[in-house]
Amino acid sequence: MPDVGPSTRLTVSLPVSLVAEVDRFLAKRSSRSAVVREALQRAVDEARRREEEERWVRGYEAQPQTEEEFGWADVAALDFWTKNRFE
């Protein structure tokens, strides 16, 4: 993961068993900090993705697509299957 700027030191308490699991991955990474940094970044990225999906859902619930807006897909599919018969 590339360095994105200044860092802040945090003190956290973790279960001994979790630290042991983190230590198992250290052969592939440079430090415990790198493992924790990567895990936190993944969690933040996943939370952002979920928020974006929720915004999309709320938007479509508030203003659903009309037949006119997505009816073209039915026409395009029918046209494709008519021209491309797979036998």
Image (cartoon, rainbow, N blue to C red):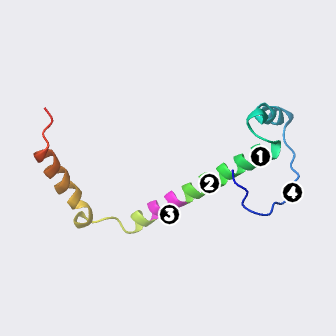
Residue 26 or 44: which is nearer the viewer?
A: 26
x then y, percent, for residue 63: 37, 69
Which residue is label 2 attached to? 45
Label of residue 34 in the image? 1
- Asked which secondary structure carries label 1, the reply is helix
Magenta segment's dominant SS is: helix
x then y, percent, for residue 34: 77, 46
Residue positioned 21% across, 60% down in the render: 71
Magenta includes 55?
Answer: yes
Which residue is label 3 attached to? 55
Quadrant of residue 66 within the rendered picture: bottom left
* Number of other residues with Cα within 10 Å of mark 2, as a class: few under 14, some 14 to 19, many 20 or more: few
Label of residue 9 in the image? 4
Which amino acid type is marked by label 1? Ala
Magenta stretch? 52-58
Q: How far is mark 2 from mark 4, CA to CA?
A: 21 Å
* Number of other residues with Cα within 10 Å of mark 1, as a class: few under 14, some 14 to 19, many 20 or more: few
Q: Nearer the viewer, mark 3 or mark 1?
A: 1
- Disc with the residue nearer the chain's start (3 vs 2): 2
Q: How far is mark 3 from mark 2, CA to CA?
A: 15 Å
- Disc with the residue nearer the chain's start (4 vs 3): 4
Q: How far is mark 4 from mark 3, CA to CA?
A: 33 Å
- Disc with the residue nearer the chain's start (1 vs 4): 4
Labelled pair 4, 3 in contact (Cβ < 8 Å):
no
Residue 25 vs 43, above or below: the answer is above
Q: Nearer the viewer, mark 1 or mark 2?
A: 1
